[in-house]
Amino acid sequence: MVAVAILAAGRGTRMKSDLPKVCHTLGSVSLVERVLKSCLSLTPSRILVIVGYQSERVKKSLEAYSTVEFVEQTEQLGTGHAVQQLLPYLEGFTEELLVLNGDVPLLRSSTIKQLLDTHKTHQNAATLLTAHLSNPKGYGRVFCDGQNLLKQIVEERDCTPEQKQNRRINAGIYCFNWPQLAKALPKLEANNDQKEYYLTDMVKFLEPVMAVDVEDEQEISGINDRKQLACAYEILQSRVKDAWMERGVTLVDPASITIDDTVKLQPDVTIEPQTHLRGKTQIGSGSRIGPGSLIENSQLGENVTVLYSVISDSVVKDGTRIGPYAHLRGHVEVGESCRVGNFVELKNTTLGGRTNVAHLSYLGDAQLGNKVNIGAGTITANYDGVKKHRTQIGDRTKTGSNSVLVAPLTLGQDVTIAAGSTVTEDVPDDCLVLARTRQVVKPGWRLKNQAEKS
Ligand code: UD1
Ligand code: CA
């Protein structure tokens, strides 16, 4: 079985960032995690990730993958030097090693599989992916004979002006026969412009080395700077959006919509312009999201509508209408056929079925039953400056406009709160609560006041 090594020790100077390059994200997933995912379907016997620059951060971004082994490259002396670090780890290993640059995040599993198959069929010492690019800037150039057998790879900065004209580039994705590679690795030298040990120089010591052209050259886009990161995002987006449209999702204005490739949609979902779907979001059939909405790590049922709103880490059940201008965050659960409307913020709150919070409210750490009606401007005062407290509201209870519910507080079922009340004590079922000062009206007051002054 094949082993995989991912090169992720470099800083990525051209990103001009404190964050290691491979930790930058493309649609909520780090570059190195994308590379890792692309090889998982091959069920590798071992996955070794070479880390160095801010290794703790790189490790953390892969902590969900318990079988990954990390190999430290304390000094980053080049891609060849990175692979040399594997020698003690792969002692006695006799099969093939796939080496993937950690900054090539759009690679498809099927392409890696093809590379591996070609490598095995021809019993090559090494096989690598290449592409013919109209703009080969920044990549190493690959020189082959007529049979795709490799003569040399020259990094762009080491190229003569003539060599630079060659548009066939090295994708940074290789399959090596490990015993042959292991024998050759100590021979690498650093006599090039960067004074680094180049993995690409291995072709000098191995035979035969074969180049395989990738079908879709977008796949092998390497990320070295922010512009390339943005280009890769565009490629990823068009892949994802095309796939959803093919599966029956309407994207009203695809160019203004972004969808992470971790999102799941059912047929007959409609996404309106300026809408962004992120993370582990799922949306049921018949739902209409947007315009102008952001949905993050949330599950929306069927026939839900969301208008100009932000929803994160929350669940919204069938037939509920959200917005305009609502914000649901921190584990909100909204039941079926509810209405959460204009300028409403919900945090860590559960609403039963057919409950309405239609205007200008903040509900935090609250649990509401079915058919509750929250009047305009109702606020849960859930924070006493030190701790958060909970509010419970029973079925069919109604709060009047501008009520303040001071938590901890329990309101029973069928309670009515008068407008403008500040409620500080629990209320049993079937009560009317007035918690405000009685209105005082003094007739003729203004006239009398003025008369005294003059
Ligand atoms: C490399 C190739 C180039 C190819 C290109 C494809 C070499 C010498 N050149 O160039 O031929 O066209 O990729 O994208 O290999 N890394 C380490 N340790 C190091 C240096 C780098 O782990 O000491 C890692 C980086 O984190 C990165 C990967 O190796 O994930 C590639 O390094 P990078 O500096 O981006 O190489 P390129 O200059 O792009
Ligand atoms: Ca690179």
Image: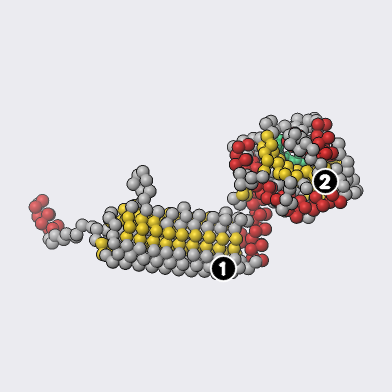
Rounded to the nearest whole Å, what is the CA distance between mark 1 and mark 2? 45 Å
Q: Secondary structure at mark 2?
A: strand
Of residues 122 and 342, the one nearer the viewer is 122
| Residue kind at label 1, given as amino acid type | Ser
Pick out the residue farthest to the right: 146
Q: Where, by quadrant of the figure, is residue 433 drawn?
A: bottom left
Q: How far across and how far down the image is residue 52, in percent?
A: 66, 35
Q: Where, by quadrant of the figure, is residue 139 drawn?
A: top right
Q: Which residue in the protein does label 2 denote?
A: 127
For image coordinates 84% across by 51% down, the residue present is: 118
Q: Secondary structure at mark 1?
A: loop
Q: How far across and how far down the image is residue 211, in percent?
A: 83, 47
Disc 1 residue crowd, few under 14, some 14–19, many 20+, Cα 10 Å: some
Q: Where, by quadrant of the figure, is residue 418 drawn?
A: bottom left
Q: How far across and how far down the image is residue 289, in percent?
A: 53, 63
Report ligand 1 position as a quadrant.
Answer: top right
Report the colour scheme: secondary structure
Q: Is residue 172 visible?
A: no
Q: Is residue 67 left or right of residue 352?
A: right
For image coordinates 53% across by 55% down, the residue present is: 296
Q: Is residue 404 left or right of residue 57?
A: left
Q: Which residue in the protein does label 1 denote?
A: 285
Disc 2 within 8 angstroms of ligand 1 (CB): no
For image coordinates 86% across by 51% down, the residue present is: 121
Q: Earlier in the sequence, mark 1 or mark 2?
A: 2
Report the disc number at residue 112.
none
